[in-house]
Image (tube, rainbow, N blue to C red):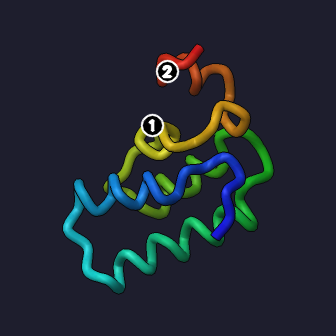
């Protein structure tokens, strides 16, 4: 598990509180996050956009909430009320 500006533990708590997922689905979400941490962390916002694209029930803003400022664009930070 990587932590390149994304709070995976808190995100998974949020996922489990908001969606009914069986253990297989939870592991699938973790695998998607691990893949994204490795291969989809090239430019700002790309990580959150990738996760939101693969998990259509989750919006970009919801993923971005768990990202650090360093991996988000200024416009996303403004949208989240962080700038």
Occupied quadrant, residue 76: top right
Mark 2 / mark 1, whichever is N-terminal: 1
Q: Is there CB contact under 8 Å for labels 2 and 1?
A: yes
Residue displayed at 37% across by 51% down: 58
Q: CA gap, disc 2 to disc 1?
A: 8 Å
- The numbered dot on residue 16 is none
> Would you place residue 4 above or below residue 1 in this image?
above
In this rendering, would 10 be left or right of 32?
A: left
Residue at image location 58% in from the left, 42% down from the top: 67
Residue visible at 35% across and 85% down in the picture? 24
Front residue of 17 and 57: 17
Quadrant where the image shows the N terminus = bottom right
The residue most toward the top is 83
Q: Which residue is mark 1?
A: 61
* Element marked by disc 1: helix
| Residue 39: image location, x then y, percent | 74, 65
User: Disc number at residue 79?
Assistant: 2
**Residue shown at 44% from the left, 52% from the top:** 10
Farthest-out residue, right: 42
Neighbour tally class for label 1: few under 14, some 14-19, many 20 plus, Cα within 10 Å = some
Q: Is residue 30 left or right of residue 17?
A: right
């Amino acid at each position: 598990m990587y932590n390149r500006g994304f709070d995976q533990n808190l995100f998974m708590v949020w996922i489990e509180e908001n969606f009914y997922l069986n253990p297989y689905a939870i592991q699938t979400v973790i695998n998607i996050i691990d893949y994204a941490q490795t291969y989809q962390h090239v430019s700002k916002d790309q990580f959150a956009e990738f996760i939101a694209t693969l998990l259509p029930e989750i919006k970009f803003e919801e993923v971005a909430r768990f990202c650090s400022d360093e991996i988000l664009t200024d416009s996303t930070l403004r949208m989240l009320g962080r700038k």
